[in-house]
Image (cartoon, rainbow, N blue to C red):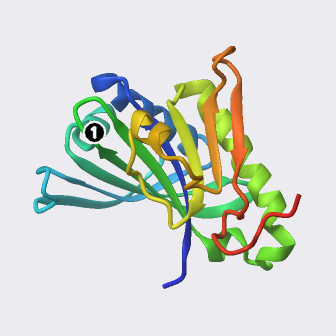
Amino acid sequence: MGSSTGIGFLYSVGDKAIFQFIEIINLILSNNGKVISLKYCKDPDGDEWVEEKAILQTLTKNILYQLVGNYYGQVNVVCDLLSEKNLKIDIYFKKLDSKNLGVLLNISDEQLFESGINERIDSVTETIINLIRQIYDITNFDYAFCDNEATIEYSLDELKAIENPIYSILALPNKRDKKELQIIKSNWHIDGLTLRIG
C-alpha cells in the first residue's frame, strides 16, 4: 500500500465540535459525493467497532449522530474534489479529550499525484489550501494542517508548545482578523520528501 496525504482540522468547542464534522461531511457529499462505507467505535480503547457498507448520497441525522456519538469514526466517500473526479477519501474523526475533536481527510498519493509528484506538487498544494479555506468558512477550526501520513495528535495548546514545524502546511486563524487564515509552509512539500524551493 502506498503513502497518503492527510488534511486535518482540530476543533476545541466541546460537544459542538461534532457539528463541525457533520459540516465537513456535508460539504464533501455536495461535490457529487457518495458514501461507500462507514464505521464507528463504541469504546475509547478501539475494541468495539460497528461497520456498515452502503452506497448513500446523503447521511441521515440518525446515522450521523450514531457516528459522532462515539469515540472514533470513519466515513469512506467518493466525490469530485481537489480538481479530481471520483476521488476516494477516508474521513476520520477522533475525540482527543472532552474538549478537542479532530477530523482528518486521508487521500492516497497515487490519486493526488497520478501524473507524477514533481509535475503536480505546487498545484495540488494550492488546491488543498483552497479547500482548507473553504472549510474554515463553514467551520472555524482552531487549526488545520496537511502533510504526508499526517495524523490528529495535538490540541491547539500542545501545537503552540512545539518549536519546530511538524506539518508541511499549517493554517491558523489570524490573531487580528479571525476571518482570515495565516498559511505557514514548512521547508518540505506535502509528499513528505520533496524540499520546497523559495
Whether residue 30 is situated above or below residue 195 in the rendered picture: above
Foreground: 22 or 140? 140
Whether residue 77 is situated above or below residue 162 in the rendered picture: below
Type of amino acid under label 1: Val
Q: Residue furthest bottom?
A: 1
**Secondary structure of residue under mark 1:** helix
Foreground: 28 or 175? 175
Crowd band around label 1 with a 10 angstrom C-alpha radius: few (<14), some (14–19), many (20+): many
Q: Residue furthest front?
A: 163
Q: How many marks?
A: 1
- 70 lies left or right of 163: left
Residue at figure coordinates x 62%, y 49% from the top left? 32
- For label 1, the residue is 68
Residue at figure coordinates x 51%, y 67% from the top left? 149
Whether residue 34 is situated above or below residue 175 in the rendered picture: below
Foreground: 56 or 13? 13
Residue 5 visible in the current orientation: yes
Q: Residue furthest top?
A: 176
Question: Residue 24's x, y, as percent?
Answer: 50, 38
Residue 83 visible in the current orientation: no
Residue at figure coordinates x 49%, y 37% from the top left? 160
- 76 lies left or right of 143: left
Q: Quadrant of residue 188?
A: bottom right
Whether residue 140 is situated above or below residue 85 in the rendered picture: above
Question: Residue 100's x, y, as percent?
Answer: 33, 34
Question: Residue 60's x, y, as percent?
Answer: 34, 36
- 117 lies left or right of 13: right
Question: Residue 23's x, y, as percent?
Answer: 48, 32
Residue at figure coordinates x 89%, y 57% from the top left? 198
